[in-house]
Image (spheres, rainbow, N blue to C red):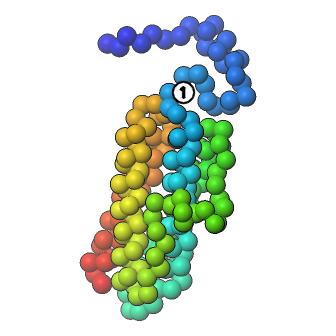
Amino acid sequence: MSDMHLSDVTTLRERARQNVQNGAVTEGYGADRQEVIRLLNEALATELVCVLRYKRHYFMATGLRASVAAGEFLEHANQEAEHADKLAERIVQLGGEPEFNPDLLTRNSHAQYIAGNTLKEMVYEDLVAERIAIDSYREIIQYIGEKDPTTRRIFEDILAQEEEHADDMADILADL
C-alpha cells in the first residue's frame, strides 16, 4: 500500500480557492511547468512541420503507385494537425503560449522538413520524421513520468499514432 493519504473535502475546497489564476495547474502539479511547456512547443513545431511536409507530398505524389501513398499522406497530415491542436490546447492549460511563428517552426521542430523529389524519397523522409517523433515522444513520456499525467497521456496517444504512421510509411516504402 502507498503512504499517500487522500485529502479531506474541506482541504480540497480550500486549496482550490488558492492561486485560482493558475487555472488547471494546482499545487499538486509536480512537473517543471516551464520545461513541460517548452517540450510541448517543440512537439507542436514538430507536428506542424510534419503537417506541411505531408501536405506537400499529398499534392506532389505522382506515378502509378501514388494514389495509395497520397491517401496516406493526406490522412497523416490531418492527424498531425489534430496532434498540434491537442498540444497547443495543453500549452494554454498550463499557462503557456503555443508558438505558431513560422520563422521558429523548423528551428524548434525535432523533425526536419526535407521535401523529397520522388515518391520513394517522400515516403522515406516521412518515415524518418515519424521515427524521430517516436523516439522524441518516448523520451518526453519517460521524462514526465508521473509528474504530469495529463501531458504524459497526450504524448502517449500521439506516440501510438506516430507508430502507426511509421508502420504505414514502412509498408509503402517496401512496395516501391
Residue at 47 percent of width and 34 percent of height: 149
Q: Find the residue positioned furthest to the right.
A: 21
Residue at 40 percent of width and 88 percent of height: 118
Q: Identity of the amino acid at label 1?
A: Tyr
- Answer whether residue 164 is visible to the viewer in this image: no
Image position of 80 with respect to 28: above or below: below
Q: Quadrant of residue 143?
A: top left
Image position of 144 with respect to 108: above or below: above
Image position of 64 with respect to 71: above or below: below
**Residue toward you, 121 or 74:** 121
Dot 1 alpha-carbon crowd within 10 angstroms: few under 14, some 14 to 19, many 20 or more: some
The residue singled out by tag 1 in the image is 29
Q: Find the residue positioned furthest to the bottom.
A: 63
**Residue toward you, 29 or 77:** 29
Residue at 56 percent of width and 35 percent of height: 33
**Residue toward you, 163 or 129:** 129
Image location (x, y in percent) of residue 161: 42, 57
Residue at 53 percent of width and 79 percent of height: 56
Image position of 13 with respect to 86: above or below: above
Image location (x, y in percent) of residue 139: 37, 47
Q: Which image quarter is the C terminus in?
A: bottom left
**Residue toward you, 92 or 13:** 92
- Answer whether residue 125 is visible to the viewer in this image: yes
Q: Quadrant of residue 170?
A: bottom left
